[in-house]
Image (cartoon, rainbow, N blue to C red):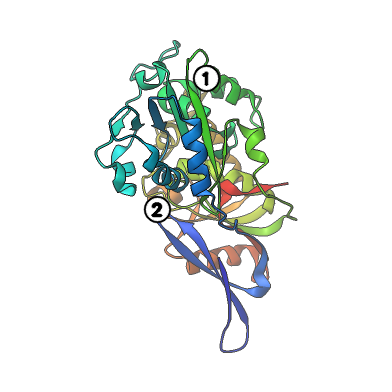
Amino acid sequence: MIEAGAEPWGQIVLEIWVPYGEVESLLTLQAENMGELIDPTPEGHTEELAQILRDRSKGHSKILLCDERPGTLKLIRSFSQFVPQDGSVKLFSTNPKAVESAIPELKGRVLKVIPPAIDSSEVMLSPELADGDSFVIATGEPDPLLGYVDARAAAALLFSPGSRRAAYESREGDTLRELEETRAHHTLVSRLEGLHGTSYATVVTRGGEPYALIEGGAKDARAHFSTQQLNPAKGVVVGAGGRGYDNTFSNSLRLMMGALKAVRKGGDILLVAECRDGIGSEALQMQAEKRLGDGNLRKAFYADGMEELGYLSALKEDYSVTMLTSLPDLYSSGRFGFKTAKNASEALQKVFSSAGRGAKLHVITRAPETLLS
């Protein structure tokens, strides 16, 4: 959302609200500094999609929720009226408490699914998924390694240990791939082959609202994205997406990579990401704690999220990055080498001190819903 006003001396200022955790952060820009604003307009179809979900899930005795993102929860809240109360259809989540807190109608009715602890070359699946007859739901997101994390990919990542490593090792080089059908994605979902009676539905959001429900992956998702063409600017403000998206630095880092087309090399990036749950991936955690040295890398060592080390390195090498985050400075500044700020005003001051007072900034409020060409 953007609002315009005037300061006492007549200059026009723009107020832009960017999702930040469960709230929003206010950015105030002079009109002369405003480039393009990419702010996906809320356009939800929750009630219609709940009807579609009811029809598609018929015949399934288990519904598996892969995340607690707003789009997923809003759709399930509307769909909950169709879930029989006799227990003939069971709902599963890795975080039942979060689901029941958001949807009181389901209190006491969401069971916990626990991924298998064994991580080996053998493909292992959680019993709830391996037994078949499941309907799997997830909110999709672009991913620079997998192209697109649809419900199939989300299920493999959550319920099949070792799947991310298999995807990483099968990647086609280190070029960033978003909303493409990648080899890494194919490797990931192939771990689910042979499951009988399992169906998948991926929620595509617009402005944070459930917008479409697809059965496929990147190709089908792309049809529901609004593609934007931008000339790269000196700087860009990137919102990782708020609650459910910017919960960790790992997730925020992956989601922001598609926005790099909006800024020139050597330019400035302001990443707005709360990261209330900390760093995230094992690889980034090891990097932050200085437990990952060159010796590990030379020995083909792997930790989940290894590809994110490449994203981090590219950002530090090619751009000046400022973070507006609750992540401790010890990590965001001391370990990852980003500038940090206590509030949005200070963050913008740091960007302009680097990019120049007359610099134009593009603003992308929701990176996961933005496709730049």
Question: Does residue 81 appear left or right of residue 179 in this picture?
Answer: left
Residue positioned 63% across, 34% down in the render: 218
Toward which corner of the image does residue 22 lie, by quadrant? bottom left
Q: Tell me if mark 2 has few (under 14), some (14-19) or many (20+) residues whose alpha carbon lies within 10 angstroms of its own.
A: some
Q: Tell me if mark 1 has few (under 14), some (14-19) or many (20+) residues whose alpha carbon lies within 10 angstroms of its own.
A: some
Front residue of 74/358: it is 74
Residue identified by numbered label 1:
166
321 w.r.t. 8: above or below: above
Q: Position of residue 217 (x, y in %)?
A: 60, 31
Q: Position of residue 4 (x, y in %)?
A: 59, 76
Q: Earlier in the sequence, mark 2 or mark 1?
A: 1
360 w.r.t. 139: above or below: below
Front residue of 292/142: it is 142
- Whether residue 265 is visible here, answered yes or no, is no
- Secondary structure of the residue carrying numbered label 2: helix
Residue identified by numbered label 2:
329
Q: Position of residue 79 (x, y in %)?
A: 42, 42
Give the residue type at disc 1: Ala
Contact between marks 2 and 1 (CB within 8 A): the answer is no
Residue 36 is marked as none
The N terminus lies in quadrant: bottom right
- Whether residue 51 is visible here, answered yes or no, is yes
Q: Position of residue 243 (x, y in %)?
A: 43, 50
**Which residue is situated farthest in the top direction here?**
122
Residue positioned 40% across, 53% down in the render: 329
Q: Nearer the viewer, mark 2 or mark 1?
A: 1
